[in-house]
Amino acid sequence: MKILIVDDEPKIAHTLVDILRGEGHDAISVSNGTSALEWAVKIVPDVVLSDVIMPGINGIEAAKEIMRCLPNCRIILFSGQASSMDILEQARSEGYAFDLLAKPVNPEVLLSAINGEGGEGPTPETP
Amino acid sequence: MGGLLSGRSADVEHERLAAVILDGMYQFVALLTPTGDILEVNRAALDAAGQGIEEIRGKPFWTARWWEISKETQEELKAAIRRAAAGEFVRYAVEVYGEKSGLTPITIDFSLQPIRGESGEIEYLLPEGRNITERKQAEDEVARQAQELRLLNERLKELDRPKTQFFANISHEFRTPPTLMLGPLEHALTAIDADKQPEEAAADGALLHMNSAGPAMVGAECAAMVVGKNVYDLIAPEHRERFKEFNERICRGETGTLEFDIVALDGVRHHMETHGAPLRNPDGEMVQLATTRDVTARKQAQEKLGESLEKLSEQAQLLDLSSDAILVRDQQDRVTYWNRGATEIYGFTREEAAGRVTHELLRTEFPEPLERIQEILSRDGRWSGELTHTRKDGGKIIVGSCWALERDAHGKPARILETNSEITQRKAAEDARRRLAAIVESSGDAIVSKDLHGIVKSWNPQAERMFGYTAEEMIGQPITIIVPPEFYSDEEMILGKIKNGETIDHFETVRVAKSGERIDVSLSISPIKDEQGRILGAAKIARDIREHKRIERALRTTEKLAAAGRLAATVAHEINNPLEAVTNLIYLAKRNLPNADKVAAYLLSASQELDRVAHITRQTLGFYRDTTSPIRMNLANTIDDLLLLYEKRLEVRHIKIVKQFERDAEVTAFAGEIRQAISNLLTNSMDAMPAGGSLTIRVRKAHEWNNSGAPGVRITIADTGSGITPQHRKNLFQPFFTTKPDVGTGLGLWITQGIVDKHGGLLHLKSRTSIGTSGTAFSILIPCNGKQGVERRSLPGASRGKVSTEVVAR
């Protein structure tokens, strides 16, 4: 699978690329939302794995834009900050349903989520 | 004693008014309750019964002297009262003790009239009685005389039957002896032929005889001028038919009474009352013997008084019940009557007002020229309009005034009845005062008034509850009873301000209850002024703010928790990111176990991340570990630690930090609280620069810039944000004031200030909103000798005054 990783923390971005490549995925990483939009359009990934709180465009704004351009792309968000939940709630009220995984994420769980086997993150439900 | 004299004259006037009503025929006028209890009785009736009003007021009417004549009379009256109370007008003749102080019986024409109030309910009974003894005696006398004549006539007939015809022909001579006998009667005594006597010159109603009082009554000089004339010629044309019927009835053998008018020979009309009795003359003809008297004067009085009786008798009793001012003035506008309502409205007593010219007394301001008013009054008999009057106390009031002109018997203006009902604010003010009194009584705040010497003048129920002293205990005592000795100077300051007419709002201080308990109160004090604006004392509202203080403390705790929560959120990000990296690195190490170099690199990296976590954790613990006593702390290091915590946020927001630290600046303080105060200012500054900017942090040893000049450390935190607008600036230190409702609790600066106050420090703010040079600088000065600073309690209410803000705006 072609996977785009977005995180402003280089150590996280690089280790995730290593892990996913080790599982045979085609993974690349960028460090902010703006770059994520740019590269998503270029490489048309199957999955975007993005941090939420980042300088510039946050993960959710970027994810919304990517969903519009690439309707078939799956988006998985992960975050270490409680405030991410507020932003996610806001997105849900606008009709966007994203998985959100809490950092630190066990790589096994992350891989299951990417393989579409359901992660530990909250499953969005529309009321 | 002018007052006494004028008082008496006012009383006399009042009585005279009443006397006018109760004069003449009306022997008896009273006012009863519907159940027959006596309210008022006129003087004539009281005198007649030899009783005073005090003896009988409030007692059943039938127990009074008049009715003691017999048990039957009393029962009859009771029954009459019941009927009148049911709305019936009751009238009957009755014998009562009515003369010579209740010793002599008289016959009265008695009536009981129900008087209804505005609601239609019967409110009073008005008994009236007039003495008809005289009339009854006259009637009896006529009957007796008629009987005598009849007997005489019979005897004459028997004695000299043959001469009967002769006597009949000279009938007037025949009647000479009885005429002589009856002459002294003051009433006209006449005999009128009722039957047809064709052989006589006299037609129906020929006047056969008249006694000596008669001619004067009809304007004749002697009886000869009228005897033989047809009596109908004298009777007013409209009464002739009635008189004829009456005459015929008498001649049929009845007796009766008739009132009628005659037109005397001189053309003057008289009203007559006649009592007639039948008399058979010697030749067997029936004639009418009548006693007639001129009741013109009585009738006039009766008519006039009858009209005004009801109104006046009620007024005489009720005038004083009216809340309107009712006054009577003579043609010179001098007050001759002044009711209780007038006293209440104007403040002048009846004694003070009597004899004064009303317009001078009340400084009347007329809506139109007085001449015009008088013109209307004399034309229409009444005038109404609005007048402005001045009360005794100098207050002006507007009244709706109604004047009625009363004319005397000759139609000349006699006096003016003036009724004034107040339409000004006085009533409204009084209502307001009543409502206010009710509020004061029921207020949840202690409301107390005191004079300029600090002596308590009033003390409401809540003051009793709050301070434990009753109104009786406190009124007349100095207010300092509830002031703790260390705050006596407050009291002096308060009285000083009150004397200058200033008010004091929300002055937070402490008072002592009777139990010795100290009560945190917020005082609002206003001067009490009289109508001339002179300051008489102070009204003080004390609110128990112990609960408020408790809530404030709870809020501070809440804010500490909120701050902890915010800190946790910040820390979470700083910890979760390294943990994410460590998790990934360990996973990779496991997957690459055969490759020792790779495993080593992953583990080294993981170890570095864990160091980072450990550092943050240490900082954080230090940040929130508060001490129970002040400790020596280095402010530069404290700020460095804080900045480390916010490093990421500053970086994300592109905020450049400029540090100007004197590294050896130390204070003794509650470290956790000082950290929180600085942290609050730092986060505010960061929030003020969402698009980046520069944050200058300065730590300098300094001296307090007030009188004490104590050494301290000044920390200045200056941002290049948009600045604080003047309208926000005044609310900045209020709890829950926030310009960031989504993230702020509105407690940060309030907490910060509380912390600075607690340390005896000072908080200073400069802000500028002009574009290009905008920014805000907060500086706090913490005294070096923190311990002393901590222990020095600031004066209650004065703490908020320590905030100084400087507005630099263009």
Image (tube, coloured by chain):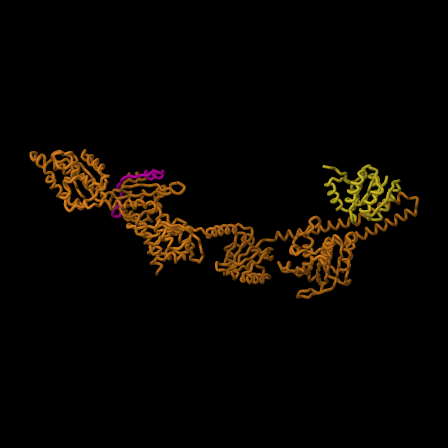
Asked which quadrant contains residue B636, the reply is: bottom right
| Image position, residue B551 (x, y; %) | 64, 51
Figure disc tally = 0
Q: Is residue B732 left or right of residue B663?
A: left
In the image, B557: left or right of B198? Answer: right
Residue B90 drawn in magenta: yes
- Quadrant of the rendered image containing residue B497: bottom right
Residue B790 visible in the current orientation: no
* Residue nearest the viewer, comparing B329 with A10: B329
Q: Quick check: B229 above or below B18?
A: above
Specify the quadrant that holds the N terminus of chain A.
top right
**In screen coordinates, is B788 left or right of B104?**
right
Is residue B569 positioned above or below B720 on the image?
above
Left or right: residue B560 compared with residue B446: right
Q: Say which quadrant the C terminus of chain A sits in.
A: top right
Give the vertical position of B156 relative to B772 (above or below): above
Expressed as whole percent of the image width and height from the top left, the position of residue B35 reads 36, 41
**Stretch of the chain drawn in magenta:** B79-101
Magenta-span inclusion, residue A77 = no
Q: In the rendered image of this protein, which colour is used for chain B?
A: orange
Q: Is residue B121 visible?
A: yes
- Image location (x, y in percent) of residue B238: 24, 39
- Tint of chain A: yellow
Q: Nearer the viewer, residue B734 or B466?
A: B734
Q: Nearer the viewer, residue B807 or B234?
A: B234
Residue B359 screen position, x and y as percent = 39, 56
